Image (cartoon, rainbow, N blue to C red):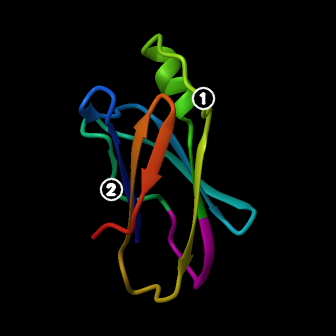
Amino acid sequence: MISTHILDTHLGKPAANVKVKLYAEQNYLAEAYTNADGRVSAFDVMDLTAGVYALEFDVGAYFQDKNTATFFPKAVIHFQVHDISQHYHIPLLISPFAYSTYRGS
């Protein structure tokens, strides 16, 4: 399973209603919007395989809705799935001019 959440460090709040797309290699798999708590609990994908995946976060639209200029219209995180039985949680911390990530639990 792949999940994510986004925290807006500029406001000190979860980033709600952000579109997140999931890709396997270059192939689009699914998309979801973060909930009020800034989370996507799981993407609607049945069969994950080992390989390289990417999450594409539409942070430009999020900041535009907040009337806030941003340098990064999208944040894209590539990550490796080695064991499909594991849960892969990829958090994203955003501000108008920076973002960071880590492997969550």
Q: Mark 1 points at which residue?
A: 71
User: Range of the magenta residues?
Assistant: 45-53
Q: Residue at x 52, y 87 (%)?
A: 82
Amino acid bearing label 1: Phe
Q: How many labels does the image show?
A: 2
Q: Is residue 33 magenta?
A: no
Q: Nearer the viewer, residue 95 or 26?
A: 95
Q: Residue at x 42, y 15 (%)?
A: 66
From the image, which quarter does the N terminus lie in? bottom left
Q: Where is residue 37 in the image (x, y as percent from the top left)?
A: 24, 39
Closer mark to the observer between disc 1 and disc 2: 1
The answer to whether marks 1 and 2 mark residues whose Cβ atoms lie closer than 8 Å is no
Most common secondary structure along the magenta stretch? loop
On screen, residue 50 above or below 6 = below
Q: Does the magenta stretch include residue 47?
A: yes
On screen, residue 10 above or below 40 = above
Q: In which quarter of the image is residue 78?
A: bottom right
Q: Nearer the viewer, residue 41 or 51?
A: 51
Question: Is residue 35 left or right of 62 when viewed as pictured?
Answer: left
Q: Where is residue 29 in the image (x, y as percent from the top left)?
A: 63, 60
Q: Which of marks 1 and 2 is nearer the N terminus?
A: 2
Q: Residue at x 46, y 89 (%)?
A: 83
Q: Which of 24 and 15 is in front in this view?
A: 15
Q: Mark 2 points at which residue?
A: 41
From the image, which quarter does the C terminus lie in? bottom left
Q: Where is residue 3 in the image (x, y as percent from the top left)?
A: 38, 60
Amino acid bearing label 2: Ser
